[in-house]
Image: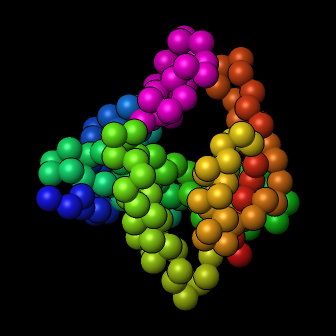
């Protein structure tokens, strides 16, 4: 059975929290001290922050489903990246994660296409995305969609500071 993509609803907050925590931990879990990681995950990816995100009319989330199991997602919303050219109405691709067991099947591209279809409304909003400076695969992925480096900032998890590139697609 092919994996399905659908827009998340408010009722998906717990499932979104679970996949957000699972994929972030799988991808970056060994990058931070356990107490910092736990605090970060609770503050940003627990159920309550997901409910807030899902209720924001400027936000949209797509779930990648294998049957009833959520195995990946893309979350977007109002831009929060620190850049002088950012404007009200701009959109940030906040997270695009797929469980490792489902990677390299074109699912990230499918999620990105669903997102871009939503983004490319008559308003033609600018897209922003933050990417870790050493995540060359993600940088190449976003470049395929017209994103290029526009700046840098520090991504903070506890006492850790990671250098992130700010990418933009006008």
Q: Is residue 133 left or right of residue 2?
A: right
Horizontal and vertical percent position of residue 15: 27, 41
Give the position of the C terminus as an image quadrant: bottom right
Q: Residue at x 66, y 43 (%)?
A: 135
Residue at the extreme bottom of the image, as rendered? 122
Q: Does residue 169 sit above or below 28 in this rendering?
A: below
For residue 166, above or below residue 86: above
Chosen colour scheme: rainbow
Asked whether residue 56 appears in the rendered view, the answer is no
Asked if residue 146 is positioned above or below residue 34 in the image, the reply reads below
Q: Residue at x 28, y 63 (%)?
A: 6
* Residue drawn at point x = 65 percent, y = 58 percent: 140
Q: Quadrant of residue 92?
A: bottom right
- The quarter in which the N terminus is drawn is bottom left
Magenta stretch? Answer: 23-46
Residue nearest the observer in this picture, 117 or 56: 117
Query: What type of secondary structure mainly makes up the magenta span?
Result: helix
The x and y percentages for residue 102 are: 34, 46
Residue in front for this viewpoint, 127 or 113: 113
Residue 167 covered by magenta stretch:
no
How many labels, in total? 0
In this rendering, is residue 71 above or below 160? below
| 169 lies left or right of 25 | right
Image side of residue 78 versus residue 161, left or right: left
Q: Is 43 colored magenta in this rendering?
A: yes
Residue 109 in picture, x, y percent from top left: 45, 64
**Image point 62% across, 76% down: which residue?**
125
User: Where is residue 75 shown, x and y percent of the image?
Assistant: 46, 54
State whether residue 163 appears in this view.
Answer: yes
């Amino acid at each position: 059975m092919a994996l399905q993509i659908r827009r998340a609803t408010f009722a998906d907050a717990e499932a979104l929290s679970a996949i957000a925590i699972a994929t972030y931990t799988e991808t970056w879990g060994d990058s931070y001290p356990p107490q910092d990681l736990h605090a970060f995950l609770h503050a940003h990816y627990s159920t309550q922050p997901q409910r807030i995100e899902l209720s924001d009319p400027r936000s949209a989330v797509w779930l990648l489903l294998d049957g009833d199991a959520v195995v990946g997602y893309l979350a977007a919303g109002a831009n929060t990246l620190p850049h002088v050219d950012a404007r009200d109405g701009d959109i940030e691709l906040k997270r695009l994660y797929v469980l490792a067991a489902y990677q390299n099947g074109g699912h990230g591209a499918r999620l990105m296409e669903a997102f871009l279809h939503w983004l490319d409304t008559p308003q033609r909003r600018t897209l922003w995305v933050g990417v870790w400076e050493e995540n060359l695969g993600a940088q190449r992925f976003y470049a395929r969609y017209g994103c290029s480096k526009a700046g840098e900032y520090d991504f903070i998890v506890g006492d850790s500071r990671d250098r992130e590139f700010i990418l933009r697609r006008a």
